[in-house]
């Protein structure tokens, strides 16, 4: 009997070929109604060059086959709705459904970006309310919602710094970046036309203030600090660092993508930051990943306001709102379109739902990271002992002697039902294991994660092979990442006729 059972694998990971492989000639997903207008011959209506008679390899499948194909594929995904997603620095927290509800309301989801400004007043009010929330949370003076990602926010911020310094007579040459910064920071500085000077963290993972005081020079435009850093550590001397920079005529940029460790507790505007971005798709609970839309608003102090990108949201004398494009000192446009408006709506819904309670979210994020730290620090190496904020960074130093590294442990976590933590950085921690549970995890899920991590530490010592060859429970095992990077096959090609299918 058993050989009659074709589906041998578990339902949620059942085999699935490509949609092209399911094709059978003549199958259709839809039936069109009979034409009730005169037929037009496309070859006459368009130039013949634009008309294709056939598309080589076009999949011909029925409706149910399309539905099943994509539904099966969707079951291969890991998602925050399935369990903890402790991908450090990425803040993969739960996004309350009410945010989605609000973003889908008529009059929000159905607005057209080219609608006349008088008919877009509601949307502009949403943007204004969000701007006010962000200014209150960060303690800054002015804001732009234009940047579409954290990295684009960084670029906007550095272009603002450049424009401001240029208006003072000299844009300067260098941007200082601590080695605990996010990898996007040096890339941004280079794209903004600056030379990057790396500054080394001290043994506690902090900027060495005395060294900065001694080595800062006149050609330093700014210091770009990720705070809390990618070690999950708060820069304790940030106010002093700001003073040193300002005395030198330099500005302080803060990468605030980790604002979920500060919101409601500390305001960058109060500790000397001149310009910063935050990631609405992290701290403000918009779903992200897979390249979907994001938003990286930039908040500035007064001196940078004239340079903000256009358009700037402005009030008119009749009490209505408008988009102001006539700003002579502006750095210009950062993007052509406004496809991420829904992200702004979700962020506002999130901020208003919490209100001052956002402080509790921050405290819970820090508590969860420290709870995990406390329960794992006897089995995994903790290279920096400074207090953890919203994430904790271990290393694989103790597992290395069994030949097990951070990637192996991350892959083994998949077998235990968790998304891996971040393995690639911070660069100053070899074999980093960067864990960010976020505030949305209940204690029970944190405990399951701790159990899994402890079990893997035990396996590394007693049965390292099982860790080194993980994952064992997924549809495909470990991929050949080197070949995938060197010889990427990004597109399915139809076989030439007569050739056997693979
Ligand atoms: C995620 C992140 C960024 C980049 O944000 P994107 O939206 O992915 O461009 C920058 N800095 C830090 C600290 C981050 O965590």
Image: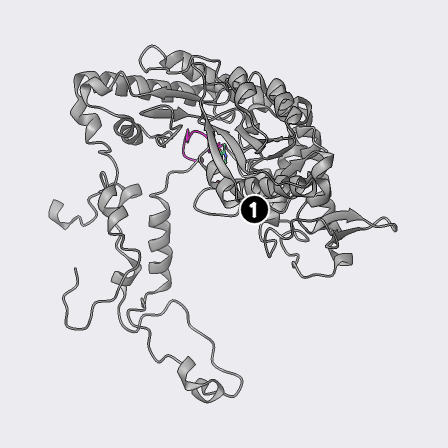
Please give the name of the residue rendered at 53% of the width and 34% of the height, measured from the top-left corner: 175
Q: Please determine whether, in this image, residue 61 is positioned above or below residue 53.
A: above
Q: Is residue 424 magenta?
A: no
Relative height, residue 475 to residue 452 (above, below): below
User: Which SS class for mark 1?
Assistant: loop
Q: Position of residue 183 (x, y in %)?
A: 44, 35
Q: Which residues are magenta?
A: 81-93
Q: Which residue bears the numbered disc 1?
A: 148
Q: Is residue 92 magenta?
A: yes
Q: Classify residue 389 as left or right of residue 166.
A: left
- Number of numbered labels in the structure image: 1
Dividing the picture into quarters, in which one does residue 117 lie? bottom right
The image shows residue 465, relative to residue 183, as above or below, that is above
Q: Position of residue 139 (x, y in %)?
A: 70, 28
Residue 64: % across, % down:
36, 59
Q: Residue at point 26% right, 64% down?
A: 493
Q: Position of residue 285 (x, y in %)?
A: 55, 36
Magenta portion: prevailing SS class: loop
Residue 82 in sight here = yes
């Amino acid at each position: 009997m058993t050989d009659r059972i074709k589906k041998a694998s578990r339902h949620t990971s059942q085999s699935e070929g490509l949609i092209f492989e399911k094709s059978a000639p003549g199958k259709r997903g839809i039936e069109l109604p009979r034409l009730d207008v005169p037929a037009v011959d496309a070859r006459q209506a368009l130039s013949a060059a634009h008309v294709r008679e056939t598309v080589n390899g076009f999949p011909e499948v029925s409706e149910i086959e399309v539905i099943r194909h994509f539904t099966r594929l969707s079951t291969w995904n890991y998602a925050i709705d399935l369990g903890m997603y402790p991908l450090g620095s990425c803040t993969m927290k739960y996004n309350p459904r009410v945010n989605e509800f609000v973003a889908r309301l008529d009059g929000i989801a159905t607005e057209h970006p080219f609608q006349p400004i008088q008919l877009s007043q509601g949307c502009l009010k949403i943007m204004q309310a969000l701007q006010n929330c962000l200014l209150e949370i960060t303690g800054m003076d002015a804001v732009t919602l234009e940047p579409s990602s954290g990295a684009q926010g960084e670029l906007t911020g550095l272009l603002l710094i450049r424009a401001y310094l240029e208006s003072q007579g000299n844009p300067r040459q260098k941007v200082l970046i601590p080695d605990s910064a996010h990898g996007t920071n040096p890339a941004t500085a280079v794209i903004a036309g600056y030379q990057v000077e790396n500054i080394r963290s001290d043994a506690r993972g902090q900027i060495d203030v005395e060294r900065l005081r001694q080595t800062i020079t006149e050609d330093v435009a700014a210091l770009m600090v990720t705070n809390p850093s990618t070690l999950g550590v708060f820069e304790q001397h940030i106010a002093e660092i700001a003073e040193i920079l300002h005395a030198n005529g330099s500005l302080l940029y803060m990468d605030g993508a980790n604002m979920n460790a500060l919101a409601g507790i500390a305001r960058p505007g109060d500790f000397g930051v001149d310009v910063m971005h935050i990631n609405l798709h992290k701290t403000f609970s918009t779903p992200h990943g897979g390249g979907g839309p994001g938003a990286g608003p930039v908040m500035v102090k007064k001196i940078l306001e004239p340079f903000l990108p256009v358009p700037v949201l402005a009030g008119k004398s009749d009490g209505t709102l408008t988009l102001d494009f006539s700003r002579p000192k502006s750095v210009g446009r950062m993007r052509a379109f406004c496809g991420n408006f829904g992200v702004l709506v979700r962020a506002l819904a999130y901020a208003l739902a919490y209100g001052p309670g956002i402080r509790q979210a921050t405290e819970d994020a820090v508590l969860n990271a420290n709870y995990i730290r406390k329960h794992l620090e006897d089995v995994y190496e903790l290279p920096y002992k400074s207090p953890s904020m919203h994430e904790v960074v271990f290393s694989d130093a103790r597992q290395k002697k069994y030949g097990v590294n951070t990637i192996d442990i991350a892959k083994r976590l998949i077998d235990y039902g968790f998304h891996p933590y971040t393995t690639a950085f911070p660069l100053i921690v070899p074999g980093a294991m960067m864990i960010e549970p976020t505030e949305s995890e209940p204690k029970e899920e944190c405990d399951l994660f701790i159990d899994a991590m402890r079990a893997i530490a035990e396996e590394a010592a007693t049965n390292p092979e099982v860790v080194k060859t993980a994952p064992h429970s997924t549809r495909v095992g470990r991929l050949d990442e080197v070949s995938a990077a060197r010889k990427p096959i990004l597109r399915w090609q139809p076989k030439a006729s007569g050739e056997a299918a693979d």
